[in-house]
Every structure is written in structure tokens, then in C-alpha cells.
Amino acid sequence: MRVLHLNAEELLRRAQQKVGLSDLGYEFSHEGFSILHEAYETEARLSLTGRLMTRHQSVRLLCNRLRIEEALKRNPGVATLPVIRPVFITGLPRSGTTLLHRLLAQDPAHRAPLSWELFYPVPAPTREWIMGDTRIAKVDIMLRGFNRITPDLRIAHEVGTRLPEECITIFSHTFLSFVFTFSHHVPSYRAWLERQDLTPAYAFHRLFLQYLQSGWTAERWVLKAPAHLFGLSALLAIYPDAHIIQTHRDPLAVAPSFASFTVAMRRALSSVVEPVAVARDQAQLWARAVDHAIRFRDSKPRSSAQFCDVAYRDLIDDPMGTVRRIYGQFHLPLTETAQSAMRHFLMRDGSRRRTPHAYALEEFGLNRREEERRYAFYCQRFDVAPEIAR
């Protein structure tokens, strides 16, 4: 079944032939691309559906990358467009990053990347064209199909064609991205990735935003991804004026939730998924992520004013108060129009929100005392309040 192969070189040739282009740009990691696809073949235990979807994703990402590089060559001025004081939201998964991202995106001064733009960014969308853009319908069909085979994911994390989405997807075009490690069991690729300098990924991230805003722009971008915890040094190297919000929540309350999310995602693609192994692996990964963020922040005291820490409970109990505190710390104007849009969003979002299923640590083979020790430094450093009895 040659059509289902995941050979890196052949997939690259296929994408280049499809669009008639060959230059992937200097930020593209050929090594990462090769290691990832070797891991797909030898470690991921992909199902037939998983092979088809993974192959389609790789070709799509390559085609996007080739087209963006060509567009930048034709209009080099795009790379000089200012990206001023972008707001990045990060923190442990399930700690309120999505809610805060979509809340801040209601401000008319802000622009957040939408799902469909991340799937098919070329040509750069414009305000005039967006209503009739056929790419929106195409992505809508894709997402509805994926939701049918992963109903648990839809409950845990609403994905919509026109909804703001994690900007980690942008990194996928460089093949220096943690997104592949969440959707697939690829330990060799992740071990390689954790040793890499992520600056090229953030450099492309900036080019991607510049390209999108060449169609239309707003005063600032608002972006989010938990995986930014691993890349704070590279993030500030590329975006020295960035504002960074880090959300905080009891790791023992969220560990089984993000383990369940990862299991559900992988079951859509792989024939064998081991929930206990996934849970332990994710607990270790995110403990390393928060420790990495702590070490970076403590090593850069001059950057402390660029960080705003937000407790999950404060966000849930008083979202508008939290917003006002964020805007105040970063000296951003909070207009009445923005506040009205945010309040309307909260009313609408609250009417749709369901009580999530409360997963227990023990359901995923996680030991309560072990997890307490694993995250003790993080909880002490940020005074994270416990949500479950110790």
C-alpha cells in the first residue's frame, strides 16, 4: 500500500510537485521532519485512518510552507511589517488558557489566529474576502469529520473554524513543534525536540503573523499555547516587547484531564494507546515545562514586568476583574467597547458550558503523593491553591 507511506523524502517531493515550488526557507528543520516521520513509522502505531490523516497533514503543512515562502519572495516588504507588543498566554493545559485567549480576542484592538487561517493561510485573508472564502467551508468539513471520530475532544476543547486557536500550529510548519508529540506517540522526536533551540520556530511564527496581517491587521496579536512554557527564551528573542500571561492551576486537578485529552486525541490516530503510560508521560512533560519556565523567569529578572500571573480560580470567579488587572499591568487601554464585547462573550460562553467530567488521578495510574512531589516547587513558587483534598 505505497499510497499510505510516510517516507519523509517522498512526501516532500509530493508537496513540491503539487505546488510547483521547492524552497522551504531557512527556518524549516529538515532534521526534525525526517526524525518525526521515522517516528511515525516505527513508534506511533498508526491505524489506517491515522496514516491517512497524518500523511494529509504533512503534505498540507509542506504545501503551506512552500507557498508562504514564495509569497514572501514576491512581496519582501511583508517581513518588515511591525508586530507590536503581542500578548502571549501560556500555562499548564486545562488551566484557563483557552477561556482567557477567547476572552481577550473580543477586544476589537486584538487579533487572534483563527482555525481556518492556520489550516490554509495562503493567500493572506482580507476583510473584504473573508465572508466568501472557500477555505472556511473546507476547514469546517474537516473539523466536523474529526469531531465525529473524536467526540470526547469536542467536549474537552471546543474547536471551530472561526474560533481563535493555539498558535502552536504555526510551529508545525517548521517541524519544530510539540503539537506532533501530543497527537502521536513519538518519543524519539520529542527527545530530539526538547534539545533544540526553538528560535527558528519563533522566527517563522513571526513571519507567519506578518503574512496574515498583510491582508488586514489589528493593534496587536493575542496568542496562546501551553507549549510556550518550553520556549520563553526564544519567544522573547524574537518578540522582545511581548506581554506574557502565565495561568496557574493545581496540577493534581488537571493532570488526569490533560491525560484524558491526549489519550482521546491519540486514539483517533493510533491502533494502540496505553492510558496509564500516556498519563505518566504527560505528567513528567508538564512538570519539566513549568520548571523550565521558572528557571527562565528567575534568570531574567529584568523581564519580570513582561509577565502577568493569573490564578485559574480568579479567572473563573471574576473574569472581568482579571482582564482589568492584566490590562493595567501591561498598560493597555481597555475601552468600554472591548469590555462590552467581553461581557457578551462570557454570557454566551456560559450558556454553552457544560460541567466537565471530573477525572481522578487513580483512573490513569497516577500516584497522588508522587504528583505532589513532582509539582511541589511549581506550586510553592506561584502559591498555587489546591483544588482537591491532599
Image (spheres, rainbow, N blue to C red):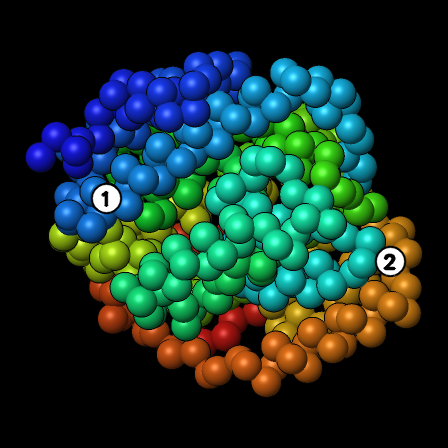
Q: CA distance from mark 1 to mark 2?
A: 48 Å
Q: Earlier in the sequence, mark 1 or mark 2?
A: 1
Q: Quadrant of residue 104?
A: bottom right
In this view, the mark in front (1 or 2): 1
180 or 302: which is nearer to us?
180
Give the amino acid at mark 1.
Leu
Left or right placement of residue 98 versus residue 364 in this view:
right
308 or 6: which is nearer to us?
6
Q: Residue furthest left?
A: 1
* Residue 39: assigned label: none
Q: Quadrant of residue 41?
A: top left
Near mark 1 (Cα within 10 A), the count class, few <14, some 14-19 or many ≥20, is some
Can residue 195 be seen from the camera position used here?
no
The local secondary structure at tag 1 comes to helix
Q: Is residue 90 above or below residue 236?
A: below
| Residue 364 in the image, given as x and y percentages of width and height | 25, 65
Q: Is residue 342 above or below residue 261?
A: below
| Residue 30 in the image, given as x and y percentages of width and height | 38, 18
| Residue 159 in the image, given as x and y percentages of width and height | 48, 62
| Residue 112 in the image, given as x and y percentages of width and height | 67, 51
Left or right placement of residue 34 versus residue 307 in this view:
left
Give the amino acid at mark 2.
Gly
52 or 20: which is nearer to us?
20
| Residue at x 32%, y 40% (from the top left corner) | 56
- Quick one: quadrant of the C terminus? bottom left
287 or 269: which is nearer to us?
269
| Residue at x 36%, y 53% (from the top left corner) | 283
Kindly identify which residue carries mark 1.
52
Near mark 2 (Cα within 10 A), the count class, few <14, some 14-19 or many ≥20, is few
* Residue 328: assigned label: 2
| Residue at x 88%, y 61% (from the top left corner) | 334
